[in-house]
Image (cartoon, rainbow, N blue to C red):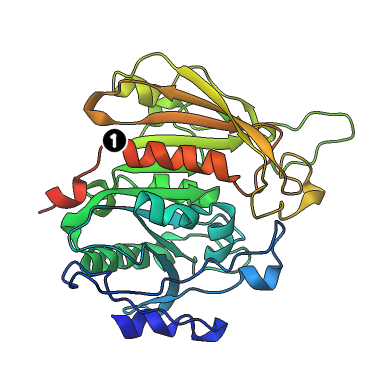
């Protein structure tokens, strides 16, 4: 496995050792985990975001990013996150937009970030080209790190990556494994309407796109966290049918999350207007949590004020989201047969 992991970073001048990742590794093993190719400040150069990954899925030969703590101990519990980019994007863009890798050591995370195969006319996740690959990435992580040490498994998807998460989450394979879904502007389980990406006539409001009705809720069980920019949604409902499913309490607004630092990424195409996004900058986010959900589930909404669809997440709001993710019920990996 070490050879597989090492191959992907040679092109960008890094080498990864996979020691200490597998459950069978002895105490004291060390590794050198891949960096996130950090930019010195916000607004990363495009060529720096295009790296393909440090790992190789052997069945397909496709590269992906695999980030994890170097100091994992044998049998230490971890939270596994499969992070999916949106249409027109790639895996390393997703690692900058949603830089959960910054928190992998603090919260003991394993993060796999792949890139969709279909690139024309727009790169996007397609069932025929990608579903088997995503399952193989998960199987690889389970094998190398040990299924029994995975405390919980989350899908995290931005935009079309969120739509893809919703499409696959109740499939036979993922329904028995996934404990939570983080939708990063990828659709809310409910009635939120989006406005991003539409160029209205001067002075006219953008026409919202209809969201799926609540009756179309997924049939399987998982925790659900939704986050979006204020400028890309028409409104955030005060109720959640997913919270109702688990008997959660009435929505509670928590203290606003204030970030004095920007995220890593500026909006990809500012000609599409503020709903699509603007320059990376500090911000404030509203946090809404539905408490006391049955079976230890977590249901929550985050709205990033004055932000659009493709501005990278700021560090404090990112961490508050991760705190909820790791607090949610897990255990599906351990109960698989």
Number of numbered labels in the structure image: 1
Residue 192 appears in the figure? yes
- Where in the figure is residue 306, as x and y percent of width and height? 71, 33
- Where in the figure is residue 133, as x and y percent of width and height? 36, 68
- Where in the figure is residue 131, as x and y percent of width and height? 37, 62
Q: Residue furthest front?
A: 28
Q: Quadrant of the N terminus?
A: bottom left
Q: Who's the residue at 71% across and 51% down the image?
A: 267
In this view, 330 is above or below 95: above
In this view, 133 is above or below 170: below
- Where in the figure is residue 247, as x and y percent of width and height? 29, 18
Q: Please name the residue that numbered disc 1 is placed on.
A: 219
Q: Who's the residue at 41% across and 64% down the image?
A: 67
Q: Residues within 10 Å of mark 1 (few under 14, many from 20)?
A: few
Q: Who's the residue at 59% across and 53% down the image?
A: 97
Kindly indicate the quadrant of the structure image that contains residue 82.
Answer: bottom left
Kindly indicate the quadrant of the structure image that contains residue 218.
Answer: top left
Give 241 or 10, whichever is nearer the viewer: 10
Q: Residue furthest right?
A: 202
Q: Residue furthest top?
A: 250
Residue 191 appears in the figure? no
Q: Who's the residue at 68% across and 40% down the image?
A: 308
Give 163 or 292, whichever is nearer the viewer: 292
Q: Quadrant of the C terminus?
A: bottom left
Which secondary structure, mark 1? loop
In this view, 298 is above or below 176: above
């Amino acid at each position: 496995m070490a050879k597989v992991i090492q191959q992907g970073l040679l092109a960008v001048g890094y080498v990864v050792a996979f020691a200490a990742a597998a459950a069978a590794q002895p105490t004291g093993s060390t590794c050198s985990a891949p960096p996130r190719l950090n930019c010195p400040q916000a607004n990363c150069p495009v060529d720096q975001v295009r790296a393909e990954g440090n790992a190789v899925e052997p069945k397909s030969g496709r590269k992906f990013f695999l980030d994890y703590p170097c100091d994992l101990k044998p049998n230490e519990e971890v939270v596994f996150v499969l992070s999916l980019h949106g249409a027109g994007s790639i895996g390393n863009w997703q690692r900058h937009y949603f830089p959960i890798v910054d928190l992998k050591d603090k919260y003991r995370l394993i993060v796999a970030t792949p890139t969709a195969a279909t690139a024309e006319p727009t790169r996007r996740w397609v069932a025929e080209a990608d579903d088997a690959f995503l399952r193989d990435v998960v199987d690889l992580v389970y094998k190398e790190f040990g299924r029994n040490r995975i405390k919980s498994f989350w899908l995290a998807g931005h935009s079309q990556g969120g739509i893809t998460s919703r499409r696959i989450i109740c499939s036979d394979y993922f329904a028995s494994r996934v404990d939570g879904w983080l939708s990063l502007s990828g659709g809310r389980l409910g009635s939120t309407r989006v406005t991003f990406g539409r160029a209205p006539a001067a002075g006219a409001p953008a026409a919202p796109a209809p969201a799926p009705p609540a009756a179309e809720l997924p049939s399987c069980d998982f925790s659900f966290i939704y986050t979006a920019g204020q400028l890309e949604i028409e409104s955030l409902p005060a109720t959640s049918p997913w919270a109702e499913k688990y008997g959660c309490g009435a929505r509670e607004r928590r203290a606003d999350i204030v970030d004095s630092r920007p995220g890593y990424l500026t909006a990809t195409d500012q000609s599409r207007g503020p709903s699509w996004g603007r320059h990376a900058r500090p911000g404030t986010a509203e946090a809404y949590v539905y408490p006391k959900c049955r079976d230890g589930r977590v249901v929550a909404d985050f709205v990033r004020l004055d932000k659009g669809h493709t501005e990278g997440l700021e560090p404090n709001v990112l961490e508050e989201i991760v705190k909820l993710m790791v607090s949610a019920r897990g255990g599906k990996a351990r109960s698989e047969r």
